[in-house]
Image (cartoon, rainbow, N blue to C red):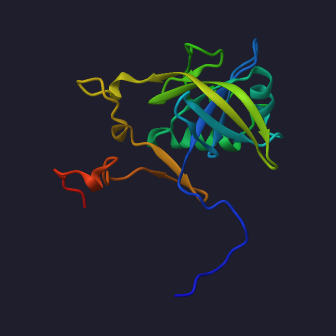
Amino acid sequence: MSREIWKAGNMLYPLPAVMVSCARPGERPNVITVAWAGTVCSAPAMVSISVRPERYSYNIIRETGEFVINLTTKKLARAADYCGVRSGRDVDKFREAFLTAAPATYVAPPLIEESPVNIECQVREVVELGSHHMFISEVLGVDVDPQYLDKKGKLCLKDADLMVYSHGTYFSLGEELGSFGFSVWKKRRSYK
């Protein structure tokens, strides 16, 4: 079997398509949709987002050192796309995308109430990589919509119908294939 060889490019898909809320003191808050986002450390809990310097939200995040990562769902797909293609210089994205700004606990920018999980972040380092600059950030708190908790208080994100981004297209996550470690369990659950 021969394989095609392409030029170097980002083909690590799918990615979370998250809405990042940010705000300068005294100004209306903004939302930017980001697909370059991920976990970078467990202890302390740290994440990264990468943003182009020419984006309106870039300077807000760089100046304030705070933002909120808001997970997206199938119901939030249109809002997430809108917040990725319109500039906060020109429009109030919360109003135009029918999003509710709710107070965060640890940072000044609001969280998006419609999101199942909101991750409050404080920037620790900015790495200028090229087309994007990476904001390496500590997670200060996580806000969870209680409708996604089971009777024991366990988070059941599979019920949220989370959204991902893959090579220019949004998808909702599908069926469960297994839980971490399922390949070595002695008592195996049935997974296809």
Q: Quadrant of residue 133?
A: top right
Name above or below for residue 118 compared with residue 177. above
Q: Position of residue 61 (x, y in %)?
A: 74, 27
Residue at 52% from the left image edge and 27% from the top image edge: 118
Q: Quadrant of residue 108?
A: top right
Residue at 60% from the left image edge and 44% from the top image edge: 81
Q: Position of residue 183 (x, y in %)?
A: 29, 56
Report whether residue 14 is seen.
Answer: yes
Q: Residue furthest bottom?
A: 1
Residue at 75% from the left image edge and 37% from the top image edge: 87
Residue at 36% from the left image edge and 22% from the top image edge: 146
Which is nearer the eye, 162 or 90? 162
Q: Position of residue 166 (x, y in %)?
A: 55, 57
Report whether residue 91 is seen.
Answer: no
Q: Is residue 37 left or right of residue 151?
A: right
Q: Is residue 119 left or right of residue 109?
A: left
Which is nearer the eye, 100 or 181? 181
**Quadrant of the image containing the C terminus:** bottom left
Name above or below for residue 119 compared with residue 49. above
Q: Position of residue 30 (x, y in %)?
A: 69, 27
What is the number of callouts on the image? 0
